[in-house]
Every structure is written in structure tokens, then in C-alpha cells.
Image (cartoon, rainbow, N blue to C red):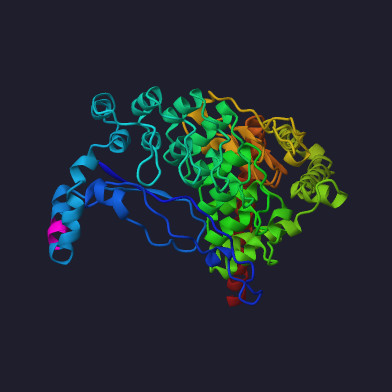
Amino acid sequence: MSQITREIPSLTNHNLARSRKKAKSTLDQTVLPTHPSLPSLSSFSLSSLLLDRIRPPFPAAMSSEIEVVDEARPADRDAAVAGGAVAAGAAAAAAAAPEESLRDDVYTAAAYGDMEKLRRLVESEGCSVSEPDGLGYCALQWAALNNRTAAAQYIIEHGGDVHAADHTGQTALHWSAVRGAIQVAELLLREGARVNAADSYGYQTTHVAAQYGQTSFLYHIVSKWNADPDVPDKDGRSPLHWAAYKGFADCIRLLLFLDAYRGRQDKEGCTPLHWAAIRGNLEACTVLVQAGKKEDLMVTDNTGLTPAQLASEKSHRQVAFFLGNARSLLDKRCDGNSRLGKLSKLGLAPVLWFLIIVLLLIYINSVIRAPTLPKLTAGFGLLAWSGVFLASAGLVLFYRCSRKDPGYIRMNVHDPQNMKDDEPLLKIEINNPALLAGNWSQLCATCKIVRPLRAKHCSTCDRCVEQFDHHCPWVSNCIGKKNKWDFFSCWYPTYWRFVILLSRFFSLLWGCSADCCSSVSDIAQHHDK
């Protein structure tokens, strides 16, 4: 049996008066109010927590927490009660009186899915399932939190309201997003729950799912129920901000895949990359940078700080180094549409072309057209022309490797800033096997596609390639499904020709050395005589 502890989602205003000298993160200046915890089966069970248990204030941070901890074992619970009898005997005795009756309430039955107890309380004892508990939470919320589909269905049939909200404005659908309870969420939505319902902080279901890394839940409600994956809360933070802050890379991939705007700035002027840098989430920063542009690294918040500067001031050295290095690489990158940019994309291919052609001409001039050629044997002439043929074939294959489509996968990209108001976000296939299996790494946030197996995104070409092997600078192209055999046909014979020529060179060198040694020996003998 698990102990359930609920912390009310909250995010208070940040102090914007931090100095440039200290440049502290806005997160460190957030002051959060005291949060009551939800009913739970703690060391004194449900009753003591229903009465008056209050949590202390949380540390300064972006906070929206619903935590689950293990219930203390009966032996440990008894030992804890016995150990505190001297100091708090009166309090324990006062709490023990209503304990048994409160154990049997509809909220506990709904939380644990005890249908027998729930039916007895409702049908025999006349308990209401629509009334909130002492802290303002409904039985339907407890059933939704723990994915108790049967209990939720029973509560709805006996008067439970799917639109009922607690004192923070959260409904049962919000609670179902905490643990990714897709079955209960599906039931609530079929019964009329509003997928875009917002609480007092402006959090919709997509925000809560992003806050807890429930990627499958987020994918389901967006693809099937058209939930908005890019809606801001009252502080201007989208689900992408929350996923970046919490470091849920899979959620970030999905949200970027769903066209969430990575450049959105909240009331502090922070983008999702700022929040990922503040928390030192290297993987989150990597995903955002790979899917972004140079301008994303240069955006400043309200205090004039970039993500790299924030990471440095928070002592996240790896993140600061990564962001600084990414910026320097992007600074050196030329515009692909300019003449210099097109030349830079050619890589080492022109150098290799020049060497091959020059060496081929030298070979033809020095061997094929040599003045002593008529004196050579027919076999040697055949070998000479075979070398010319192999070199020419290698040039053809080399051209095919460098110019042929390596297996680029068609992109599915559009600019969310230029979208029409009535234009829906990117539609995805709800029954996609990769997404149903939770293989979120197959999502490409840049190309906005679900990659097939063995396909990868090339950071140099900025495209996804089927059966991607590597990006070869010598051919200035990716090596993938459609040109891999041309690549092997081109480079394997070249490799062996190089080995043969190298071995021939060393054999000649060895022969020359032997002749030199013999000559030196003859001279020495002649001198002795």
C-alpha cells in the first residue's frame, strides 16, 4: 500500500530586482507559500493528516509537485508511535480516536480502488461522492491520481462531477496527468471533462504532464483530444518551459515535434533554454540546441543574461561549456545560401578530386606514354591500362557518392510563427508503433518526423538519413541507404590499391637499401686491398 502526498502546484512571482553584479537566478529569489499536503496514510494513517498536518514552505524553485512515498510498514509505524509516546502521547491518543472511522471514508476507498468498501459506503451508509474532503479534494480526484478506472466510473455514475475543482482550480483530469493515468483520463474526457481546463495558475493538463515527465500521457491527449501543447500559463510559461526546467528530454522531443515554440519568453524573459541552463540539465540543453538556431543561444532574459551566462553563474560547468562551444561553432558556420557557405559545405571533396585527377594524369604521362613503352611486355601494358580503368571507375563512383541522395527522409516542417490562427498544429499518427511503444528517441525535433529504425539525424546536413552511417568529409556527403554501396565500391578498391602501392614502395626501398649496402661493402673490400 502506498502513501500519497500531494503538494499544491504553485509558482509565485520572481524578484526582478537582482543586480547585474550578482546576477542571481530568478529561481533563487522565488518565495513560495506554505503548501498543505493531501490526505495520506502516514505513520498515524489517514486521520491525523486529514486533521491538521501542514507542510513547511518549499525551497525557492519553480514548483508543482505531487509526490508519492512508501507507506511505513506496520512494525515501523508502531515503533514510531511507541517511541514518541512520552513526548506526544496526548496528541497520538487524540488522533487515534477518529482513525478507524476516517479509514473507511470514500476518499480512501477511491484512492485504493476498494470497490467493495466504496459501494458499502455509498449504497448502505449514504456517503456522498461529490462532497470534498477536509482539504477540499474530491473522491474523483483521488481515483484519477491512482488510475482507479472502476472507482472513477462508479463515482461518476453516482453523482461525481468531472468538472469539480479544488481550491487551486485543479480538476480530476489534472490529477490524472500526474502519474500518466491514461485510462482514467480517457474516461473523464468521454464524460465531458474539458481538456483545456486551467487551474488558478493557468496550468492546463499539458502543463501538469510536462511537469512530471508523462510523455505518453501528453502524446495521447494531444494526438487524440487536441490538447494545446504550446499554451502558456499565467506566467507565460508553456509546457516546454516546464519540461526543460525539470529535465525531461523525451517530453522536450515530443513538444518540439508538436511545434511547441522554443523561442517563447516568459514574464522573466526566459526561454526554455534559459530554464534548462539554470537547472544544469545537459541533455535538455542538447535537445533544445540541436533543434534550434544560433539566435536561440543569444536571447537574453530581463536582466540581460544568455543561457550560457546563467549556466556559468549557477556553476553548471558542463552546460556552460556546451552552450559556449555551440555558440562558437554556430558563429563559424557560414550561410549555406552564400557563395562562401556553399564552398564551406564542400569539405575536403575538392582536395581529393584534385589529387586523384593530378595523380591519374601523372600516371598516364609517365607510364602509358613513356618512350620505353614499346619495349615493355604485353602483360605490363595490360596492367598499366587496368590501372587507368580502375582509377576512372573510382572517379565515377566517387562522383556518385558525393552527389547522390544518401537516403534523406522528407521533412515535415513549418514555421509556427507564420501559422494561421485556424491552422491546426502538426497532426501525428495516433497508432504509430514507435510512439505507442514509447520510443521517443525516434522523434526528430528538427525534421518533425518519426524516424524509422537505423535512421539518424546528421548535424552537418541537418537532415535525417535512412540507415545513416556517418558524414564523410572526403565526399562531402552523408553515407546512408542509397549510396553506401557506391561508397564501399569506391573506397575498398582504393584502399587495397594504396596498400599494394605502399608495399611496392617499401619493397623498392628495401631493394635500394640492399644494393647500397652491397656497394659500400665492395668499396670497403677494394680499399683494404
Q: Residue furthest right?
A: 339
Q: How many marks on residues?
A: 0
Is residue 492 visible in this depiction of the protein? Answer: no
- Which residue sits at x=66%, y=29%? 482
Query: Which secondary structure type mostly characterizes the magenta part of the structure?
Result: helix
Instruction: Tell me if residue 111 is in the magenta stretch.
Output: no
Residue 146, position as x, y percentages in the image: 36, 36
The quadrant the C terminus occupies is bottom right
Near-viewer residue (143 or 440) = 143
| Magenta residue span | 79-83
- Which residue sits at x=53%, y=59%? 279
Q: Is residue 518 above or below residue 264?
A: below
Q: Is residue 259 above or below residue 117?
A: below
- Tell me if 44 is positioned left or right of 337 in this view: left
Q: Quadrant of residue 80?
A: bottom left
Is residue 510 visible in this depiction of the protein? Answer: yes
